[in-house]
Each structure stands twice: as C-alpha cells, then as structure tokens.
Image: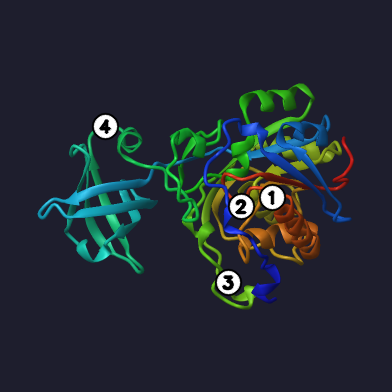
Amino acid sequence: MDLNLFDFDLPDELIAQTPLKDRTSSRLMVLDKHTGDVTHDIFSNVTQYLKAGDCLVLNDTRVLPARLYGQKEDTGAKIEVLLLKEQNADEWETLVKPAKRVKVGTKVMFGDGRLSAVCTGELENGGRVLKLLYEGILYEHLDALGEMPLPPYIKEQLEEKDRYQTVFARHQGSAAAPTAGLHFTEELLQELKDKGIHVAFITLHVGLGTFRPVAVENILEHDMHAEFYQLTAGTAALLNKVKEEGGRIYTVGTTSTRTLETVASRHDGRFQEESGWTDIFIYPGYEFKAIDGLITNFHLPKSTLIMLISALAGRENVLNAYRKAVEERYRFFSFGDAMLIHEGGNTLK
C-alpha cells in the first residue's frame, strides 16, 4: 500500500499556530463514513450528533512540561533536554541538544539547581538516558521549570500552558496532548451527560513517535511506536453495557481509538480491565471491533493518523473531505478544527 495514497496539499497558513480563546468555538466538519457526505457545523453543537445511551470515550492523559533548559555543571554550556519516557525510577529516556556535549557521567543543572540530571547512557539520534536528581515531588519541579513540548509545526509561543492540556487531564505521562480532547469544556461534558450520553475515560500516554513521519514507501513495512495504555474495570463494564443495550461508542481522538481497538481485538470485541503497551497500526482494510464513530482533528499528510481515519471512513471519502477543508479554510493539526466521523453524518440525532 503506497504512502503517496495518503498525501494531500496543505497550505502552511492553514496550520493553526495558536488555540482559540473558547475551546468549543472551533469548526466541526461532519463526515458520513459510508456515503462520504460532508456538512459544516461548530463544535459546541457536537451534542446534537449523539443520543442518549451512546458513550463518549476520552483520553485523560496529562502532558508533562517536559522541555527543560539547563547548563552543564562543569562548563556552563547550554543544554536542552526533552523527557520522553521514564524507564526506571527517575531514570528517563530523553532527547538532548546538542547531544555531543552530553556524555555518560555529564551532569546538567536546571533552574536554581532544584533539579539536576546525570547522563547514564547514550542512545541513537541524540538520545540519552538521564538520572534525575531532586528533592520532593518531580512533577512540581517540572511545572516550575519545564515548557510544554509543542509539536514541531507550531512555531508560536504558547501563552497559557493549560491550553495544551485537556480540562479532564489527570494522569501524568504524555509527550504530546490528545488534541481532539482540547475542544471540550466542563460545561460541554455536563451537557452531554444531561442528555443521557455516557462519558468515560481511558489513559494512553502519547509518545513523540506520533509526529514521526512514515519513512517507507510501502506503509505495510512501517514500524509503529509503542505507547502505554490503561483501561479500568469501570470503563470496560460501561462499554460492554453500552454495546449490549444498542448504544454507540464514540472515541475522542486516535489515541482513545487505538486503546479500545487494542483491547477489543484481544477479547473478541469485548472490553476488560487491562494495561500495557500497544503498537497497533490501523490502516484501510482494518475491521473495527470497538468503535462506531470518532471525533478527531485534521492530520498530517502521509501520517499514520490519516491512515487510521481512512480505515474508518474510506480513503477517498477522507481525502475528499480534506480537500473541502482546505477550500473552506479549516484550521489544521493540534490547535485546529475538528471532524466527526460517523454513520448518518448529515443528519442531526
């Protein structure tokens, strides 16, 4: 399956650089996954497309302010560190710039010295293993010293750190936000509940591999990065009940989708309490076992994410919808507008 089948033309000016002031005021494109019909709406009306008994599943991961700026203890040389994944207690896989200045044994100081790190291992492509040294609670130090690791296509400075965080973010561990969730407010979630729509949460810690381009022409040769997920017993029971009673399951974002499909694929379409690492790769031809609909942002050309939504709605339907999004000047990527993919895309529920 050729990578170029998932390409499209995107003007740079449509890549949203800053979030809207009101989370729910973004635009919403509604795509019928069977017919390809497209309608245009605003996100605050998303409640009209779901009905009592349906379930909305969101990813409650919390983004670490994981970009740190420090100095080598011995020379004072400036070092930039991006925390990627905790391997052992306080020992992290990181990206370091400039990596050549950080060898095993190098000590880096951050801020007023409340946090420091010693290099304990070297990895490929500028990767380093750093042992973090501090007193107290690590996440409090990161909140004080770190910056949000915004995607590489966002060049603007983020004025409010919390705007790259969902309002329901709970479990620390992501290198990037589950951006489809950024459109929701507490008030909108309450509106859904008041309508009889279930709201459930999973956790998947997003890795920076989500931004890594597909480097092979045949996508079947692509190796997916693995990410940690957790599905609680309560959420599993609710999802099974919704299915049994004829309700529909809508995931918010590709991360929630990959979590539910991972679990359902292992248990004949049912859900159970589970945690672990998933490297599931969903592309056209995949048979969905968990979800009925998806709320997502607009994705990068040739990305695994556009392959996933093409599996759900059909590649031609998706690319046609993306062409319309470009024509209608939708805002793309993390701080951009949203798309709802489901059956009956042009009919209010």
- Mark 4 against mark 2, which lies toward the viewer? 2
Q: Write down the residue under mark 3.
A: 222
| Residue type marked 3 | His
Q: Write down the residue under mark 1.
A: 329
Does the residue at mark 2 contact the one at mark 1 (Cβ under 8 Å)? Answer: yes
| Residue 38 at x, y percent in the picture | 83, 50
| Residue type marked 1 | Arg
**Mark closer to the chain start, 1 or 4:** 4
Res. 14 mark:
2
Quadrant containing the C terminus is: top right
| Residue 53 at x, y percent in the picture | 82, 32
Is 142 on the left or on the right of 107, as rendered?
right
Spatial separation of the CA atoms under disc 3 and disc 4 = 41 Å
Does residue 46 show up? yes
Q: Is residue 84 above or below residue 58?
A: below
Which scheme is used to colour this image of the protein?
Answer: rainbow
Instruction: Give the residue at x 69% y 53%.
Output: 261
Toward the left, the furthest residue is 74
Q: Write down the residue under mark 4.
A: 136
Spatial separation of the CA atoms under disc 2 and disc 1 = 7 Å
- Mark 1 against mark 3, which lies toward the viewer? 1
| Residue type marked 4 | Gly
